[in-house]
Amino acid sequence: MKKVLTLCMIQKDGSVLLGMKKRGFGQGRWNGFGGKIQEGESMETAAMRELREEAGVVAEEMEKQGILEFEFQGNPEILEVHIFRVIRFTGEPQETEEMKPQWFSVNEIPFQDMWPDDEHWFPLFLQGKKFHGIFVFDGSDTILEHQLKEVEHIQ
């Protein structure tokens, strides 16, 4: 059983916008902005809506850069996360009920306070490469196994 989710990342002038998750799944970790696709929404529309709801900015142009699948031992649900790079946006990031956005220099990304898989795929994202990966977790802090590859195209 798959659950399809979106994740938006904004990289600008040597910095990346991350949000501190204030509640729910991933609380207490820095992450991109995203979530579930609502009925009748396209993946891109969902990604843009989540970014607007969680960070107060409007994506004007974006491209899909990666797909990651996450399995958590003991949970039959697979999370399929479609990662988008926001190329152009309007508005200033604002704190919301769910997220507290903050810019980080690409040299100072707080991997120690992010999901453990991020340090594997984030360098590919920062280089503008397209990728596909699978991560199997035991709990939320331990990666049991993973595969990650650079790809030419993302569906």
Image (cartoon, rainbow, N blue to C red):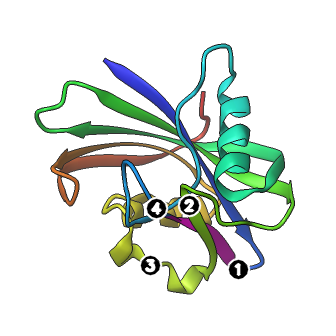
In the depicted structure, whether residue 113 falls above or below residue 35 = below
Asked if disc 1 and disc 2 are in contact, CB closer than 8 Å, the reply is no
In the depicted structure, whether residue 43 falls above or below residue 62 = above
Res 99 label: 2
Which one is in front, 51 or 66? 51
Q: Seen in the image, is 100 located left or right of residue 61?
A: left
Neighbourhood count class around disc 1 (C-alpha, 10 Å): few under 14, some 14–19, many 20 upward: few
In the depicted structure, whether residue 3 falls above or below residue 146 = above
Q: What is the magenta range?
A: 14-20
SS of the residue under disc 1: loop
SS of the residue under disc 2: strand
Res 66 label: none
Which quadrant holds residue 41?
top right
Give the alpha-carbon distance from disc 2 to disc 4, as whole Å: 6 Å
Which comes sooner in the sequence, label 3 or label 4? 4
The nearer-to-camera label among 3 and 4 is 4
